[in-house]
Image (cartoon, rainbow, N blue to C red):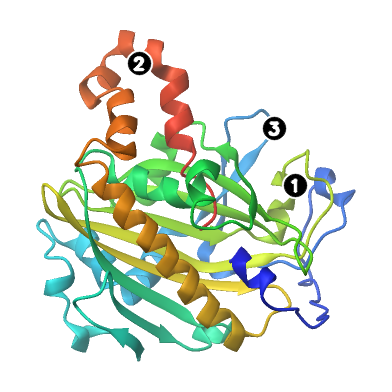
Amino acid sequence: LPTIAARYEPSPIAIPRRKGVPTTPKCASRRLIAAFGNPKYFTDKLIPADKPGAMLKVPNFDTLFDEICKVSPLAKQAITQDKPGGINAIDNTADVYKWKVTDSNPNRLVSHIDKIDNFQKNGVPLLRFRSTLHGPTERRALCFGELISTTELRTKWDATNAIVDTTYYAADLKEVDELQGHKYGESLLFGIGYVKTKQSVVSPREQLTICGLQEFPSGAAIIWGLELEEDQNYLFPDDQPKRMPRSTTHLFSTTIIPKGDDTFDVEYVLQLEVGGFPGWLTGPVVIDTVKKMFRFADGYFKSGLDGGDLAKKLASMPDDEDAADPESRELNESSVLDEEQTLLMPP
């Protein structure tokens, strides 16, 4: 996460580019940075993006969600249970991997943090956070995603973020649902996000990530993200031609489980590698940064219950019935896309 750059100076580590990765003519003219997406999570299938000539690589959804279920009990509940029980229903003895608890206190906002060091030999820990928040039911997953993916909200807890932008999204979400086999809820969002950090005591970092949002009949939702493979480097924004050292989201998921009209559980799982930083430094700073995000989220979601910022935002958005009406959809198409596509940025 960008806050690391403000605290530590990385050693000059040369990261070799993976061999045998094809490039497209468009990206062949650019200096390519070592890449980073894990091939096991991707297929060779492509679907059209919303912009002419751009094709989006499709993840192997079975592999992706199998791994997410192994590291996130709440995600497994969301996918497999009609009435998920949330944090209180987690059976820790069912964990597939061995986790190390770093903090656990049910009276704290972030009630549980644990980790797996060097998960999948990526050199950095996989971190897992659990929290219970209070806020309105309407558009919970979208609103939570915006804490990470919109400049307006992210800069309130992450002052080092320079650019948060959607570059592409899927032209037709029906194609995504078909490729998922309709096994992982309904795909509400699918696309590519770009993030760049500010210059500080070290050079900026950047990411190019594919992200999505799955919603389930129970009201549960999963936001997920992966770093793109190197053969997708041509999707970097045209107005950012100079490549920066790359940070890598090896695996990301946020699962939201409703507990009542005003309460919901969140499980936030992230394995982030920051180019040039040792894993033992990365982990503690990621923990500190995610805690800051949850502290901001706590107040933000509560504001949806007392007429604050979130309540005003929700009141300005079209309700679900209006959005379903063809005439209303045409009138609100631009604003709805602006709201929804902001989620498609890296965690």
Say which residue appears at 76% left-offset and 65% top-offset.
Answer: 245
Say which residue appears at 58% left-offset and 88% top-offset.
Answer: 280
| Location of residue 204 (image quadrant) | bottom right
Under mark 3, the amino acid is Gly
User: Which residue is labeled 3 in the image?
Assistant: 53
Say which residue appears at 29% left-offset and 71% top-offset.
Answer: 130
| Residue 279 horizontal/vertical position (percent) | 60, 85
Q: Is there any visible trace of residue 33 in the rendered image?
A: yes
Does label 3 or label 2 sit earlier along the sequence? 3
In front of the other: 153 or 1: 153
Under mark 2, the amino acid is Arg
- Circle 3 residues within 10 Å: few <14, some 14–19, many ≥20: few
Query: Between tags 3 and 1, which lies in front?
Result: 1
| Residue 50 horizontal/vertical position (percent) | 57, 30
User: Which residue is labeled 1 in the image?
Assistant: 234
User: Which residue is labeled 2 in the image?
Assistant: 329
- Circle 1 residues within 10 Å: few <14, some 14–19, many ≥20: some
Residue 57 lies, with reference to residue 14, above or below; the image says: above
